[in-house]
Image (cartoon, helix red, strand yellow):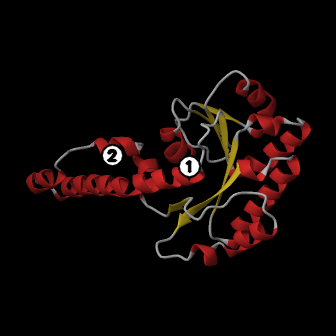
Amino acid sequence: MAKHLLKPRIPDAEVITIESINADEGEEQALRGRQFAELQEYLQITDNVIVDIGASNVEELLSSMKRYRGSHGDFDHFIVPTVAALKQQQDTIATLVELAQLGVPACKVRVLFNMVEDGEDLAQVFDAILSFLVAHPVAQADPACRIGANEIYGRIRRTGVELSALLADETDYKALIAAAKGQAEKIRLAQRLAARRLAAGVVPELDDCFAALRLDDRPRTSAAV
C-alpha cells in the first residue's frame, strides 16, 4: 500500500518503513519500532511522509505513542488495512480501538479492504469489522476503498520492476515471441506481456481506491498500519 498505492499519488512523498522482520528492500529509510523518538524528530523537519508500519511493529508503535502523549497528532491520516481472515479482522479491530483510545478521531482513520477476491460480497466477508464499526464508529470504512488480490504484486517483488515502468513499456511482445527461437525465451517474453497486462488492470483499481481514501487535504504525514 505504501509503495504502490500511496507513494505514486502523493507528490514528492518519502516512504519510511518501520518493520523488524521481512522488511521490503529498496525503501528510502528503515526504522525499528523502538526508534520512535528518532521518527518523531524526523517528522518535525520534513513534509509529505508516508510511514509504513509493519504488522510486527504496530503494537510497539502504539505503545510508544502512549508514552509520547500527543505524538499521534504528527500524523494527518491513519490507513489501516484488513483482509478477510477472521483473525486479521480481529487484529484490525484491536488496532482501531487502540487508536481511538489514544485520541485519534474517526475522521483521521481509514479502513482499507485488502486482497479482496473477485466476486466476494464485501459486507459478508468483512462482517466482523463492519459490524464493529456500526456499533463503535471509530474509523471510516468506504467499500470503494479496496484492493483486489492480484499476482502482479508478487511478480513485482520478484523482478523489482515498478508498475509505472510496466505501463510505459510499449514493446511488441507478440512479435518478439513469434520471432524467438527457444521455448525458454518465448516463455520469458510471454511473462513480460502478462505482467504488463496485469499492471494495466490494477492501476485503475489503485486510482479508485486512493480516491475513496479522500485524502483531499494532501497529507503531511500518513501512516499505513
Please state the total of marks drawn on the protein image: 2
User: In percent of the image, x 78 and y 56: which residue is there?
Assistant: 95
Q: Residue furthest left?
A: 179
Task: Tell me the distance, in whole angstroms, between the alpha carbons under discs 2 and 1.
Answer: 18 Å
Label 1 secondary element: loop
Q: Note whether residue 20 is visible.
A: no
- In depth, the one of 214 and 109 nearer the eye is 214
The spot of residue 158 in percent (x, y) is 43, 49
The residue labelled by disc 2 is 166
The spot of residue 140 in percent (x, y) is 69, 58
Tag 2: residue type? Leu
Tag 1: residue type? Met
Pointer 2 or 1: first along the chain? 1
Image mark for residue 1: 1
**Residue 13 lies in what quarter of the image?**
top right
Q: Is residue 165 left or right of residue 69?
A: left
Q: Is residue 57 left or right of residue 185?
A: right
Q: Residue furthest top?
A: 45
